[in-house]
């Protein structure tokens, strides 16, 4: 069991909270950066944290603005590792076009650089793990315009070019923010040659129970919406890229990346091999596993969500980290069971 102290940003996010819990489960001590006292209490009140009863192994640093210069300098003192998960996300309609740069791209770059600079000042840090995204290894045209040609496969070595604005949507800007943050990380390492190693994690669309969501309507506010939409009757004609990964697997990847036996580098997370995710399969999965909820009308289960195929190679991650990625079916079952739990309904 590991005993070193790991500093985690973004601990109240979908992936961040599960990563925090996984780190505690695997024996690490955690210092979590939170924006406010209320965010700290949100973590402490979660059932999985209370069940672990971590005591002094879980502490907090209040960091109101994650992007200001020196924001993390004090918080990372005496830490052996850093997992940087905090980064702007996109919710439909929340960001105006004129704010894409200031709301998405600049914070993604500045937040990452702030962590790297703090790690360089704190001589104790041995490795920094940074959350990126599959959008940083796949050109944006394959998300929004085209299906990647047969035989084209993306992996940890793929390097899209940063595309400057203006951007046609907030999702285009989000994609650009991840590419920009990755390039800033690589430039920092090249220019400063820090005394710590850096690993980047590239998950696809993250699906699975988010324990910090306590109202069923909020389950569809993040990436879980991609799986829930057809179950709840939404009908879309716009294809969604067929790439997803279970939140538990992504959390495991982040914590496993701290292990000195795992070489620092780049690791992609995605399920179901080259076949990838078929979003419409969510309706079949629910019909087979939650027939009572369908018969009661809780799930209309008649929505439509076309898929744009994307081939992703995760063999490096599976071999080195020893992970076998949970299927899309397991992802759907996880989030649907949570939805029913919040509705006060039986899962079966």
Image: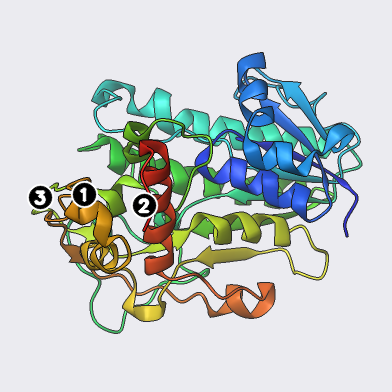
- For mark 3, does the 10 Å Cα neighbourhood hold few (<14), some (14 to 19), or many (20 or more) residues? some
* Residue 98 spot, x, y in % from top left: 27, 21
Q: Is residue 242 above or below residue 216?
A: below
Measure the C-alpha gap from mark 3 to mark 2. Answer: 18 Å
Whichever of labels 3 and 1 marks the residue nearer the N terminus, that label is 3
Q: Are marks 2 and 1 in contact (CB under 8 Å)?
A: yes
* Residue 276 spot, x, y in % from top left: 34, 73
Query: Quick check: 169 left or right of 173?
Result: left
Q: Which residue is mark 2?
A: 336
Whichever of labels 3 and 2 marks the residue nearer the N terminus, that label is 3
Question: In front: mark 3 or mark 1?
Answer: 1
Query: Quick check: 287 left or right of 332?
Result: left
Splitting the image into 4 quarters, where does residue 52 fall? Answer: top right
Q: Specify the label residue 299 is tagged with.
A: 1
Q: Which residue is mark 3?
A: 235
* Residue 284 spot, x, y in % from top left: 23, 68
Query: Which image quadrant: the N terminus?
Result: bottom right
In the displayed orientation, state which residue is furthest to the bottom: 151
Whichever of labels 2 and 1 marks the residue nearer the N terminus, that label is 1
Q: Are marks 3 and 1 in contact (CB under 8 Å)?
A: no
Residue 137 seen in this snapshot: no
- For mark 2, does the 10 Å Cα neighbourhood hold few (<14), some (14 to 19), or many (20 or more) residues? many
């Amino acid at each position: 069991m590991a005993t070193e102290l790991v500093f985690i940003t973004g601990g109240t996010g979908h992936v961040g909270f599960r990563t925090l819990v996984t780190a505690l489960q695997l024996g690490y001590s955690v210092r979590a950066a939170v924006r406010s006292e209320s965010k700290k209490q949100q973590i402490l009140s979660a059932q999985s944290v209370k069940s672990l009863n971590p005591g002094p192994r879980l502490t907090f640093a209040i960091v109101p603005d994650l992007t200001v210069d020196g924001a993390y300098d004090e918080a990372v003192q005496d830490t052996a590792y850093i997992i940087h998960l905090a980064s702007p996300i996109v919710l439909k309609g929340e960001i105006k076009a004129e704010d894409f740069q200031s709301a998405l791209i600049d914070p993604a770059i500045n937040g990452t650089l702030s962590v790297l600079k703090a790690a360089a000042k704190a001589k104790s840090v041995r490795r920094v793990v940074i959350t990126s995204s599959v959008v940083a290894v796949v050109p944006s045209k394959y998300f929004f315009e085209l299906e990647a040609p047969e035989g084209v496969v993306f992996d940890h070595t793929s390097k899209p070019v940063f595309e400057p604005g203006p951007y046609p949507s907030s999702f285009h800007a989000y994609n650009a923010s991840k590419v920009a943050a990755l390039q800033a990380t690589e430039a920092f390492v090249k220019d400063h040659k820090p005394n710590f190693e850096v690993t980047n994690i590239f998950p696809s669309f993250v699906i699975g129970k988010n324990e910090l969501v306590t109202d069923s309507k909020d389950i569809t506010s993040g990436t879980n919406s991609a799986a829930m939409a057809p179950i709840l009757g939404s009908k879309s004609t716009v294809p969604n890229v067929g790439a997803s990964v279970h939140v538990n697997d992504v959390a495991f990847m982040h914590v496993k990346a701290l292990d000195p036996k795992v070489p620092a580098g780049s690791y992609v997370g995605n399920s179901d091999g080259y076949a990838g995710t078929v979003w419409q399969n969510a309706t079949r999965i629910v019909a087979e596993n939650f027939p009572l909820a369908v018969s009661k009308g809780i799930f209309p289960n008649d929505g439509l969500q076309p898929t744009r195929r994307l081939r992703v190679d995760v063999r490096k991650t599976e071999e080195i980290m020893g992970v076998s990625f949970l299927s899309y079916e397991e992802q759907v079952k996880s989030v649907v069971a949570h939805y029913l739990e919040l509705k006060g309904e039986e899962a079966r």
